[in-house]
Image (spheres, rainbow, N blue to C red):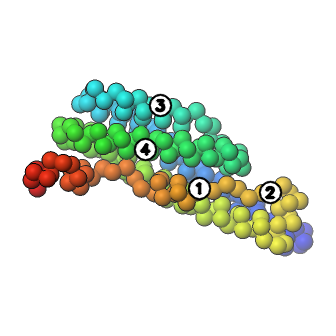
Amino acid sequence: MLAISGCGYNTLQSNDEQIKSSWSDVINQHQRRADLVPNLVNTVKGFAAHEEAVFLGVTSARAKVGSIQATPELINNPAAFAKFQAAQGELTGALSKLLVVSENYPQLKSDANFRDLQAQLEGTENRITVARNRYIKSVQEFNVTVRSFPSNLTAMAFGYTIKPNFTVDNEKEIARPPTVDFNSARAKLPDDANGAGK
């Protein structure tokens, strides 16, 4: 028993459980975002019905996210993990396009329901970033244990291998919530060259 406790076995168990807990938080926050999408799309549709390509892009991206079974086993499969990352990145991009489209509709921007959904989306994006950062730290601690001596011998004996983590490029993308500040976005529009929006 003393040999097992001194060889990193307990640390591996603890780190593995922390990863599972952190992963559950990541999934919960992504689900929260996915649940906001239909209401956001329907609200924008009420004011900008002819933006069909944008709506289809968001709906398609949400469907891809929903088709991936985000089970705890996914974090042990680098290919499945990469697919999860790509689908979530696509949804982030589609939501950004949807919010950019809404800039062209002043009545939509002043709609209380839309403003509430925007605030919820921004808050959710921030929660996703926090949850992913916790997951990244948990995976880092686990992977260090798996690769360090003598716990690496225990890891090999019990079949523990390093786990995939979010990439730096993806982390930069997901850490940036969709732009929801329409005033700063308007400053970039060509009309401002003529003094509009000042």
Q: What numbered label is drawn on residue 166? A: 1
Mark 1 touches mark 4? (CB < 8 Å):
no
Tell me if 5 is positioned left or right of 187 in this view. Answer: right
Residue for badge 3: 60
Tell which circle, 1 or 4, labels the residue nearer the N-terminal end: 4
Which image quarter is the C terminus in? bottom left
Above or below 62: residue 74: below
Q: What numbered label is drawn on residue 26? A: none
Mark 4 touches mark 2? (CB < 8 Å):
no
Q: Count of labels shown? A: 4
Amino acid at the residue labelled 4: Gly
Tag 1 secondary structure: loop
Residue for badge 2: 160
> Label 1 to label 4, Cα distance in Å?
17 Å
Q: Residues within 10 Å of mark 4 (few under 14, many from 20)?
A: some
- Pick whichever, 78 or 153, lies toward us: 78
Tag 4 secondary structure: helix
> Label 3 to label 2, Cα distance in Å?
36 Å
Amino acid at the residue labelled 1: Phe
Q: Residues within 10 Å of mark 2 (few under 14, many from 20)?
A: some
Which image quarter is the N terminus in? bottom right
Q: Position of residue 186 (x, y in %)?
A: 21, 50
